[in-house]
Image: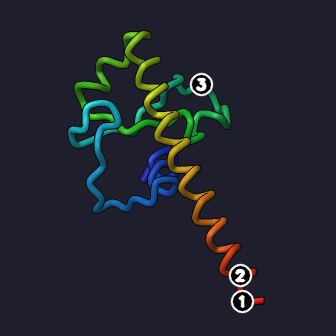
C-alpha cells in the first residue's frame, strides 16, 4: 500500500476491504488524490488535508482548478467532521475516567 493511501485509510479507519466513497459524487473511489501536486520530498504531500478519495471521473476533473478547489472544500469539511467526532469520543472517555476516580 502506498504511503499516502495508508495515511488516508488510518485517518478514516478504513482497511483494504472497506468500500470507500468518492468524496465528491459518492461513487466507488478508486484513487487517493493529492489536492496539491506532489513535489519532491515535501512532508505536507501526505497530510490528510491534501489527500482525497475520488472515483476515476472526479479524479480526471481535478485538473480543472475550480473543480479541484471545490473538492478541497468538501474534503476539509469531512476532515473537520472526523476530527470533531474524535474530540467528542475523547471527551466521553475522559468523563468516564473521571467518574471512576
Q: Nearer the viewer, mark 3 or mark 2?
A: 2
Mark seen at residue 39: 3
Observer-nearest of 77 and 21: 77
Q: In the image, 32: left or right of 27? A: right
Q: Residue at x 29, y 21 (%)?
A: 60
Residue beneath disc 1: 100
Q: Is residue 19 above or below residue 25?
A: below
In space, the residues marked 1 and 3 are separated at their CA atoms by: 50 Å
Residue at 29% x, 44% y: name it. 21
Disc number placed over residue 64 in the picture, else none: none
Residue 91 point in image, percent of width and height: 66, 65
In space, the residues marked 3 and 2 are separated at their CA atoms by 44 Å
Q: Nearer the viewer, residue 82 or 42?
A: 82
Q: Residue at x 52, y 23 (%)?
A: 37
Q: Nearer the viewer, mark 1 or mark 3?
A: 1
Percent coordinates x, y for residue 39 in the rendering: 59, 24
Residue 33: % across, % down: 41, 33
Contact? badges 1 and 2 (CB < 8 Å): yes
Kind of element beneath mark 3: loop
**Quadrant containing the N terminus in the rendered view:** bottom left
Label placed on residue 97: 2
- Could you say which quadrant of the image residue 64 lies in? top left
Q: Check the image and report above or below for 33 versus 37.
A: below
Q: CA distance from mark 1 to mark 2?
A: 5 Å
Query: Mark 3 near mark 2, Cβ–Cβ under 8 Å?
Result: no
Amino acid at each position: 500500500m502506498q504511503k499516502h493511501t495508508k495515511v488516508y485509510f488510518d485517518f478514516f479507519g478504513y482497511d483494504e476491504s472497506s468500500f470507500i466513497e468518492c468524496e465528491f459524487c459518492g461513487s466507488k473511489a478508486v484513487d487517493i488524490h493529492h489536492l496539491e501536486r506532489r513535489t519532491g520530498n515535501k512532508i505536507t504531500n501526505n497530510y490528510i488535508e491534501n489527500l482525497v478519495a475520488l472515483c476515476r471521473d472526479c479524479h480526471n476533473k481535478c485538473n480543472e482548478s475550480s473543480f479541484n478547489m471545490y473538492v478541497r472544500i468538501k474534503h476539509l469539511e469531512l476532515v473537520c467532521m472526523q476530527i470533531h467526532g474524535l474530540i467528542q469520543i475523547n471527551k466521553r472517555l475522559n468523563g468516564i475516567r473521571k467518574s471512576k476516580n
